[in-house]
Image: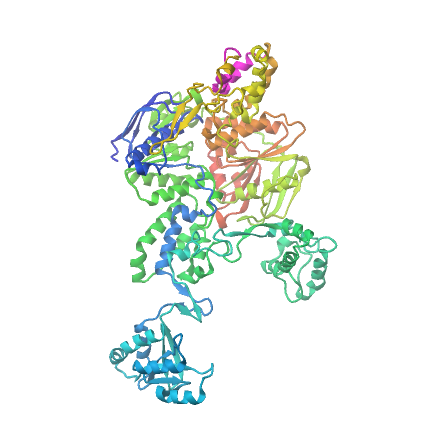
């Protein structure tokens, strides 16, 4: 696309867009920003991307369209200059347990091809390369023999099925062969047949070979090649791929094989399917290509790693009967110097492994659980075994999902199983230092170029700590988006329109600079890059900025500003400009809170965490920070949350590996994870139903005079059950008409006109509004309506409704409609609705630890104030808050910092700092220290 071209949009009315018109320069990096709910995604994804996709689909045949995504035309008058669109969103694209980083980025597809084409197979016994030998290999061997060496060209004697040895020898004579080698002696076949008539059989230990040819080596190597080439080919044919050279001076047999064999083992030849775990041919037969199996979970067997074996670290070896295993072990431990009083977490790997495998003095845990499995007819053994079962890494494939044969194929000493377990940083080093022959380079140059390009991109976007074997469904939204971007960039498209949804999410500020460079490179290829973003650095580096607003929901949907960064700084209406000028910020606390009570986690070694111990203060805001991959989610989501869940007697997923949880845990009454998963279980769920406000609204309408006169109960005003809802659309308000070759058509229900209810129900009105009108109100409009009626006849109902929905306004969601479908909410909005639901509950005499995972996702700097005020209310109510966060605008309001690092993956997992905010500035190797200092006022630096 030429840079003087423009993408022109006129009359856009999608969602809350107010019939806007906007021009976006093509071939530039454009940032769309604005308050949460101001219409950014509606403009970028629901208008631009939807129209780009629709035009592509419409260009195909009717037959092809039935197999593709069906998209409606967005509500817009005119769009011109639009290019083929590629949208990369935050949402995890798959829940497939077989999907990995390698498959999503397509790096693994290229790896499979690389190993199938230039991989060399090595025997696990001798380490020799396995290869099919040809005539030239035999000749090369013969040419190295000393002159005047007598050479015998042989093959193992093959007796065809249905023939006796005598018949087979007679047939060989008819084919022109006259001699055999029997136990290193040359005998004519005719003489041997005479001997056979006397012996009638030969021993199994006897060596019988058919002699194809014989010769004497000379200095003339060319003569040997010309003389024996045809004979060698005949030997391979007669010997079913085996040719043997016998030299009588040293009685040596040298075997050559066209078969893919070595050390008596037949190997699979490298092929793409051999390295595919999605194919039954290549998948590990134990785990069927999943990488995990249901087995004995070590974390359940040894739950408290701070205990010693003597003190009861091994959970199943307790009680009167099973304790005998522990007694037997303690009685013999002195014989092999096992430290029975040392905490399990301090044992070395050999000692830990010994407990499982056992030795000649005692039977280990593996034998113990094998005993349980052999006695499953006893119910107590079945119950005990079930306590320690869980998903564990497959022991056969080490979680790589491939059959063992794939590990025999190597390139420069590394198998594909080794490579998928390497961090991307180390994998990139491997390919940068790869030394190949001229032939191998010609075969693999294109493959290596594609692999190196994707690895470089992943490293440049802060994902160098990931492995190709990492499951896609364990990635955060930001990681998923950057990985999808790597795949999109791999196609090397030009003249396209890339639309990204907050690519900076999950990225530490120190890595944002690399991401900006990637976006600019994408632009310089000739693409239009449109980014929906709140990050200050990305906004400042953009060529063109579109600021949506001025408010959110119905108060938004307008273009407040469009132009360059320099022009934005002079705008008086934009909240973004006010923030950049320092006019719109919360003051940092001058007197930080000094926590008195803590809960502590000891010896945490989950994933890349290096046996760390941390403390979380109670009744305070704690921010867990660090670069991407430093171990934040491992610490909070996989260890802290499930450990507290189990402490409070709630069912939780398998907890991560740690020693113990201790401290003032008795002061807590519960733990809540407030994540970005959708609210409700269906599209019928909405903010009003989630916060139970709709129950109060239905009670209000059931109490109105007309409802009592007609006998309407609260359930009559529900659109989810039969009664007052419209049965034609079943309370949906729309009817979907399926079209075979076109997109499904969504029509407003003719019966209820999209109101969801029967006309009789709509007769019941409160303050001139029926139940359908109430659902169409925004939270702020509903608050205005019901608060004005608190002192009237139905004031108690109105007060309860206001109490339920006020927290939505407090967390900055006053723009949402009460009846807005949960499917239309972003992850950040869903998270704040969950926060509002907790704020709406009194929770008397409770002290809950709330965990928020990147709560600033989708939040403009202006909206962070609302979120901070909301969590402050939780602190004032006696609760505690833990934030996993990268946004320094929120981190600077924390009372306590736990900073992990210094890098991601195996170079991270250390506690760089834990303590009050002002102390982190002294930590030189902390990336957070340098990032937070830029956000603090002068007095706090």
- Majority secondary structure of the magenta segment? helix
Residue 284 point in image, percent of width and height: 48, 56
Q: Is residue 802 above or below residue 507?
A: above
User: On the image, which quarter does residue 409 sit in?
Assistant: bottom left
- Which residues are drawn in magenta? 766-790
Q: Nearer the viewer, residue 479 or 286?
A: 286
Residue 524 point in image, percent of width and height: 29, 39
User: On the image, which quarter does residue 85 sit in?
Assistant: top left
Q: Residue at image x 26%, y 35%?
A: 1
Q: Name the residue at the right extreme.
A: 320
The reply, left or right, for residue 327 in relation to residue 443 is: right
Q: Nearer the viewer, residue 225 or 936?
A: 225
Q: Is residue 481 above or below residue 363?
A: above
Q: Is residue 59 above or below residue 10?
A: below
The reply, left or right, for residue 296 in relation to residue 334 is: left
The reply, left or right, for residue 197 in relation to residue 390 is: left
Residue 715 point in image, percent of width and height: 57, 21
Circle count: 0
User: On the image, which quarter does residue 661 sit in?
Assistant: top right
Residue 940 point in image, percent of width and height: 52, 32
Q: Is residue 343 above or below residue 558?
A: below
Tell me if residue 260 is in the magenta stretch: no
Q: Nearer the viewer, residue 845 or 406?
A: 406
For the rendered model, the colour scheme is rainbow
- Residue 587 visible to an observer of this rendering: no
Tell me if residue 782 is in the magenta stretch: yes
- Residue 374 visible to an observer of this rendering: yes
């Amino acid at each position: 696309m030429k840079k003087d071209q423009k993408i022109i949009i006129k009359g856009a009315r999608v969602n809350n867009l107010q019939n806007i018109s906007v021009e976006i320069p093509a071939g530039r990096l454009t940032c769309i920003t604005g308050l949460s709910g101001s219409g950014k995604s509606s403009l970028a994804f629901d208008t631009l991307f939807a129209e780009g996709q629709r035009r592509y689909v419409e260009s195909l045949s009717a037959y092809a369209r039935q197999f593709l995504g069906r998209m409606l035309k967005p509500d817009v008058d005119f769009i011109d200059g639009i290019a083929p669109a590629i949208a990369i969103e935050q949402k995890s694209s798959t829940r497939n347990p077989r999907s990995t980083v390698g498959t999503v980025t397509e790096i693994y597809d290229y790896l499979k091809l690389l190993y199938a084409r230039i991989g060399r197979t090595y025997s696990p016994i001798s380490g020799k390369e396995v290869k099919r030998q040809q005539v030239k290999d035999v000749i090369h061997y013969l040419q190295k023999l000393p002159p005047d060496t007598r050479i015998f060209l042989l093959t193992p004697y093959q007796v065809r099925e249905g023939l006796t040895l005598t018949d087979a020898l007679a047939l060989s004579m008819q084919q022109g062969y006259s001699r055999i080698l029997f136990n290193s002696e040359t005998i004519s076949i005719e003489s041997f047949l005479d001997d056979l008539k006397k012996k009638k059989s030969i021993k199994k230990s006897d060596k019988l070979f058919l002699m194809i040819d014989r010769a004497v080596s000379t200095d003339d190597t060319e003569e040997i090649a010309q003389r024996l080439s045809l004979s060698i080919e005949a030997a391979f044919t007669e010997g079913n791929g085996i040719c043997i050279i016998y030299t009588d001076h040293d009685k040596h047999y040298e075997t050559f094989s066209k078969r893919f064999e070595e050390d008596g083992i037949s190997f699979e030849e490298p092929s793409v399917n051999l390295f595919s775990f999605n194919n039954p041919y290549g998948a590990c037969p134990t785990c069927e290509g999943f990488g995990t199996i249901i087995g004995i979970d070590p974390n359940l067997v040894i739950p408290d790693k701070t205990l010693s074996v003597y003190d009861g670290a091994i959970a199943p070896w307790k009680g009167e009967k099973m304790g005998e295993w522990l007694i037997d072990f303690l009685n013999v431990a002195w014989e092999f110097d096992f430290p029975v009083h040392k905490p399990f977490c301090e044992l070395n790997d050999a000692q830990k492994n010994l407990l499982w495998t056992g030795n000649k003095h005692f039977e280990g845990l593996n034998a113990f659980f094998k005993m349980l499995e052999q006695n499953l007819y006893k119910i107590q053994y079945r119950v005990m075994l079930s306590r320690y079962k869980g998903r564990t890494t497959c022991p056969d494939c080490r979680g790589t999902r491939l059959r063992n044969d794939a590990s025999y194929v190597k390139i420069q000493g590394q198998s594909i199983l080794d490579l998928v377990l390497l961090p991307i940083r180390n994998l990139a080093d491997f390919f940068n230092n790869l030394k190949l022959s001229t032939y191998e380079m010609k075969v693999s140059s294109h493959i290596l170029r594609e692999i190196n390009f994707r690895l470089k991109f992943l490293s440049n976007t802060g994902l160098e700590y990931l492995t190709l074997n990492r499951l896609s469904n364990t990635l955060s939204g930001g990681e998923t988006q950057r990985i999808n971007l790597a795949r999109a960039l791999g196609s090397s498209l030009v003249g396209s329109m890339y639309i990204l949804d907050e690519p900076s999410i999950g990225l530490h500020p120190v890595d944002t600079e690399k991401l900006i460079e990637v976006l600019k490179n994408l632009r310089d290829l000739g693409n239009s890059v449109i980014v929906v973003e709140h990050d200050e650095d990305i906004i400042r580096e953009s060529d063109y900025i579109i600021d949506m607003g001025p408010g959110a929901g119905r108060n938004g949907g307008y273009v407040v500003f469009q132009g360059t960064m320099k022009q934005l700084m002079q705008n008086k209406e934009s909240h973004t400009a006010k923030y950049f000028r320092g006019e719109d910020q919360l003051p940092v606390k001058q007197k930080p809170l000094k926590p008195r009570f803590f809960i502590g986690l000891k010896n945490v070694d989950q994933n890349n965490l290096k046996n760390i111990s941390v403390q979380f203060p109670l009744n305070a805001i704690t921010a867990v920070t660090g670069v991407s991959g430093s171990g934040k989610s491992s610490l909070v989501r996989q260890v802290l949350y499930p450990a507290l869940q189990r402490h409070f007697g709630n069912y939780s997923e398998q907890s991560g590996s740690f020693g113990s949880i201790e401290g003032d845990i008795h002061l807590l009454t519960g733990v809540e994870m407030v994540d970005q998963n959708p609210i409700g279980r269906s599209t019928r769920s909405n903010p009003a139903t989630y916060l139970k406000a709709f129950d109060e609204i239905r009670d209000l309408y059931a109490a109105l005079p007309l409802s009592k006169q007609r006998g309407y109960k609260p359930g009559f005003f529900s659109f989810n059950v039969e009664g007052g809802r419209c049965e034609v659309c079943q309370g949906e308000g729309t009817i979907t008409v399926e079209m075979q070759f076109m997109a499904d058509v969504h029509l407003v229900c003719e019966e209820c006109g999209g109101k969801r209810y029967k006309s009789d129900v709509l007769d019941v009105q409160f303050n001139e509004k029926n139940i359908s009108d109430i659902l169409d109100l925004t939270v702020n409009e509903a608050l205005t309506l019901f608060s004005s009626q608190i002192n009237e006849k139905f004031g108690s109902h109105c007060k309860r409704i206001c109490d339920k929905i006020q927290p939505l306004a407090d967390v900055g969601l006053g723009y949402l409609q009460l009846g807005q479908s949960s499917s239309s909410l972003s992850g950040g909005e869903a998270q704040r609705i969950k926060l509002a639901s907790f704020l709406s509950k009194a929770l008397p005499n409770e002290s809950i630890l709330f965990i928020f995972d990147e709560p600033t996702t989708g939040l403009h700097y202006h909206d962070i104030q609302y979120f901070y005020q909301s969590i402050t209310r939780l602190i004032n109510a006696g609760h505690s808050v833990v934030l996993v966060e990268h946004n320094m605008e929120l981190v600077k309001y924390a009372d306590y910092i736990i900073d992990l690092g210094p890098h991601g993956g195996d170079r991270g997992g250390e506690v760089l700092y834990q303590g009050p905010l002002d102390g982190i500035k002294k930590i030189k190797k902390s990336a957070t220290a340098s990032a937070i200092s830029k956000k603090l006022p002068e007095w706090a630096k």
